[in-house]
Amino acid sequence: MTASSAPLAGVRVIESSMLGPAAITTHLADLGAEVIKVESPSGDYVRRMTWPIVEGVSLMHLHVNRGKRSVVLDLRTEGGVQTYLDLVRDADVVIEAMRPGGLERRGLGYDKLREVNPRIVFCTISGYGMTGPYADLPSHGVAYDVWAGLVKPEITEDGFPAIPEHPSVGIHAGPLFGALGVLAGVIRARSTGEGCRLEIAQSDAAAAMDWLRSETWKAYERPEDEVTGNASDNYVRRAPGTAGMRDGVRYQFYEAADGRYVLFQASEREFWKNFCEGVGRQDLFEAHPGAQYADHAVGNVELRKELVEIFRTKSAQEWVDFGLEINTPMVAVNTPQTLADDPQFQDRFPWIPAERLGADQTPSPIKYLDVEVPVPTKAPTVGQHTDQVLHEVLGYDDAKIAELRAAGTFGDPTDA
């Protein structure tokens, strides 16, 4: 595949980032955008901040900075600032993935960047955003999920509260929303010639991803004659959020013969009928036909006991295969460790091997049916591409680069 055939070929991004928020441009690089990561001489300490450390470099760096090129500029120097502006001159996007205002303090705020490129799209991504009482509060990833009500403490055997095993939402959803907003800005800029400024808070993103629960609580503040339950529950309001699933029967976890669990989801009458006929238990359907839609058979202990015994007759994978055969939704419960062994994962989500990226990594989930996307390159070392980018992108000759180096634009030349 040639670089010009990638979906985002021709989109150039200048990134100033620290730690995980750099993932905002990972999504763009995966689709072919040119991402130039501008680093201070000391570099982004994400390389040594998180674990696991793979051959001396953190997995987070290897993943979120894959497909990018690294340029070192000391923005405390006149040459560093001027070179940054030269990079922005023909770019589409500038990303400030750190506490808001970092570039402004170096004389590279949005207004200054617009002077050299009126169509620049400037995006700041941070923990709690640019406004609000928490704007200046230092934070790390799980904070956004805790703030958004997604992660609650568990109590250890010795009585201490502890952070439980959990999926990370805000640190992943924030960059994803940010990438979407950036691309919308680029489309607008290419149409109108005018850039824009946007900002993303990872805390906002965590709350937005869990909108159903928070909006349900809000809806249930209204009178009961305005907000009811489903017809299948005789319009009785379940507990807010997704708590109504806890006592479901036709929408529930069941243990399989091999000790693994299966999530059974026959809440539509059609699926429930298919299941009962498939296991040779039409009597269950006749006794408990339920409503046509959204019927979890909440609290039906008699039916739940029957299903417990039925699900003990097949392995988890056999139940998934059975669901395909009879057209009833069910899925085996995976863990982050077992997921890679699942046939669906293996078919659609093959690892990008460590030989290429330094660690085995999952690919972008975006699949074009008629356009190839590039295979990412390994995350760069600090300043790995400085000379290359200055030659190729800015047209600087060797003499100018040597002059900048002597002036400390790339850090103290005595440290080289």
Image (cartoon, helix red, strand yellow):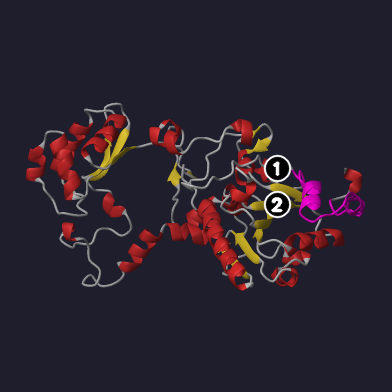
Give how far apart the Cα atoms at labels 2 and 1 are.
9 Å
Please tell me whether residue 288 is drawn above or below residue 223 in the rendered image. Answer: above
**Which mark identifies residue 124?**
none
For the residue marked with disc 2, what is the amino acid? Answer: Lys
Pointer 2 with pointer 1, Cβ within 8 A: yes
Report the amino acid beneath label 1. Pro
The structure residue drawn at horizontal position 32% and vertical position 31%, both measured from the top left corner, is 260
* Rendered image quadrant of residue 114: bottom right
Which numbered marker is on residue 37? 2
Crowding around mark 2 (Cα neighbors within 10 Å: few <14, some 14 to 19, many 20+) is many
| Residue assigned mark 1 | 380
Residue 187 within the segment the image draws in magenta: no
* Percent of width and height locating residue 375: 59, 41
Q: Residue 395 lies in magenta, yes or no?
A: yes
> Which structural element holds mark 2?
strand
The residue range painted magenta reads: 382-410
Front residue of this view, candidates 403 and 262: 403
Q: Residues within 10 Å of mark 1 (few under 14, many from 20)?
A: some
Residue shown at 52% from the left, 39% from the top: 362
Dot 1 lies on which element?
Answer: loop
Residue 233 screen position, x and y as percent: 17, 57
Q: Position of residue 126 (x, y in %)?
A: 60, 59
Q: Is residue 356 visible?
A: yes
In the image: residue 364, left or right of residue 295: right
Q: Residue at x 44, y 38 (%)?
A: 348
Q: How far across and down, in percent of the image, does residue 298 sit?
A: 20, 50
